[in-house]
């Protein structure tokens, strides 16, 4: 496909209004790539930290951001075997090589040749087939764009890393975020009791609606472990799914029961944490790092959405021209659900 398309282009790091809407060439897919007509693109927090300059890895300018992509395949390269023209797809966050030892042993999210998915803030994007998984056409683009980096990562955290099971008590921080919402839903579906942590009293009822048994309202630096212990009769939680990171680390670790599993999904701030190692072995705790989403996990997450077990929440849909407003909302933490662009 020749011609030009509209895209939100970022020429340097800066505030939300740093984007410019420009006419740029439609990308040409390579042999292993598909050209996707973008149906929707979620505004992720990684987009925000790339735009404001906090996240610099694999970032070059000018840049077209956007990793949470859904759309329709309109062209396919000669080596594409998993997808065909007309398929509706959503993306994972990284492109893996598929050939290295890590990829061949089911650990593709740590592929040493991995490349980030970008380009969703445009009418078309060319991506390697590895980044894309087809979903049923009946499901809406606005919902499906964030399933990979949202529900897919949550499934990785809850099921495959923390191994949540029936009877566990699970604490979810950042519970109204893109990974937090499906973490609550998946943990509840696994038979766990779910305690959700949020900064906003206004979002408490929303969290109960999606499956939280208890909701704790706490500021970024508040040690809410006492509230957790009160809810759990002094025992603490079996699992922490932490989508926030350093500012809640002490509260989360203090909330952990003996033999608890602490799964770290996100780090939204630059601070480091300090802990006496003795605290870890006295509690017999396991501290676990959660990576991105694999193709298999994304396929499973799509199935959970199709069956209604996970119901991604869309807060607001903006046209591409309002990308600055979308970034301001996400950066300010004002959304209960995903903020989505429709190019």
Image (cartoon, rainbow, N blue to C red):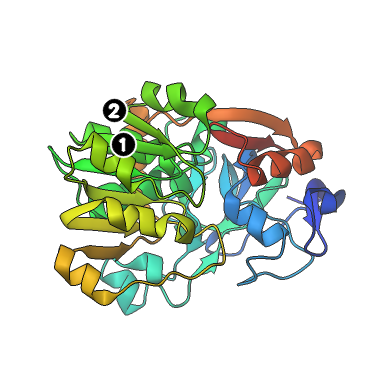
The residue shown at (44%, 71%) is 97
Q: Where is residue 174 in the image (x, y as percent from the top left)?
A: 46, 44
Quadrant in which the C terminus appears: top right
Q: Nearer the viewer, residue 69 or 269?
A: 269
Q: Which of 156 and 116 is in front in this view?
A: 156
Q: Where is residue 225 in the image (x, y as percent from the top left)?
A: 32, 47
Against 133, residue 271 (above or below) is: below
Q: Check disc 2 and report its element: helix, strand or loop.
A: loop
- The quarter holding residue 304 reads top left
**Whether label 1 touches label 2, CB < 8 Å:** yes
Residue 156 visible in the picture: no
Q: Nearer the viewer, residue 245 or 43?
A: 245
Answer few, some or many: residues within 10 Å of disc 2's Cα (few below 14, many 20 plus, some between 14 and 19). Answer: some
The number of callouts visible is 2
Against 270, residue 306 (above or below) is: above
Q: In this view, does 25 lie to the left or right of 160?
A: right
**Which numbered marker is on residue 109?**
none
Q: Where is residue 76 in the image (x, y as percent from the top left)?
A: 56, 52
- The residue indicated by pointer 1 is 195
Q: Is residue 60 left or right of residue 133?
A: right
Q: Is residue 22 left or right of residue 327?
A: right
- The Cα atoms of the two marked residues, 1 and 2, are separated by 6 Å
Residue 11 visible in the picture: yes
- The residue indicated by pointer 2 is 213
Q: In this view, does 90 lie to the left or right of 242?
A: right
The residue shown at (41%, 52%) is 82
Q: Position of residue 213 (x, y in %)?
A: 29, 28
């Amino acid at each position: 496909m020749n011609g030009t398309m509209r895209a939100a282009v970022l020429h340097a790091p800066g505030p939300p209004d740093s984007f410019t809407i420009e006419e740029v060439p439609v990308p040409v897919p390579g042999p292993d790539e598909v050209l996707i007509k973008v149906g929707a693109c979620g505004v992720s927090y990684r987009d925000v930290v790339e735009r404001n300059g906090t996240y610099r890895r694999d970032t070059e300018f000018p840049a077209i951001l956007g990793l949470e992509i859904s759309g329709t395949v309109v062209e396919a390269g000669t080596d594409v075997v998993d997808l065909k023209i007309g398929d509706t797809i959503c993306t994972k966050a990284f492109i893996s090589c598929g050939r290295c030892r890590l990829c061949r042993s089911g650990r593709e999210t740590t592929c040493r040749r991995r490349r980030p998915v970008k380009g969703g803030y445009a009418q078309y994007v060319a991506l390697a087939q590895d980044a894309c998984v087809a979903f049923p056409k009946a499901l809406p683009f606005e919902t499906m764009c964030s399933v990979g980096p949202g529900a897919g990562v949550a499934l990785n955290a809850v099921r495959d890393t923390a191994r949540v099971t029936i009877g566990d008590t699970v604490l979810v921080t950042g519970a109204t975020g893109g990974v937090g919402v499906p973490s609550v839903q998946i943990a509840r579906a696994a038979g766990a009791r779910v305690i959700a942590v949020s900064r906003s009293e206004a979002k408490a009822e929303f969290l109960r609606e999606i499956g939280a048994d208890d909701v704790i309202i706490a500021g970024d630096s508040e040690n809410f472990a006492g509230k957790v212990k009160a809810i759990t009769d002094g025992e603490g939680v079996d699992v922490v799914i932490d989508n926030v990171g350093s500012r809640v680390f002490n509260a989360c670790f203090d909330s952990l029961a003996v033999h608890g599993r602490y799964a770290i999904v996100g780090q939204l701030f630059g601070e480091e944490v300090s802990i006496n190692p003795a605290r870890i072995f006295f509690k017999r705790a396991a501290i676990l790092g959660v990576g991105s989403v694999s193709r298999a996990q994304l396929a499973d997450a799509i199935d959970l959405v199709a069956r209604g077990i996970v119901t991604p929440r869309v807060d607001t849909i903006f046209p591409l021209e309002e990308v600055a407003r979308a970034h301001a909302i996400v950066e300010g933490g004002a959304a209960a659900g995903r903020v989505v662009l429709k190019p």
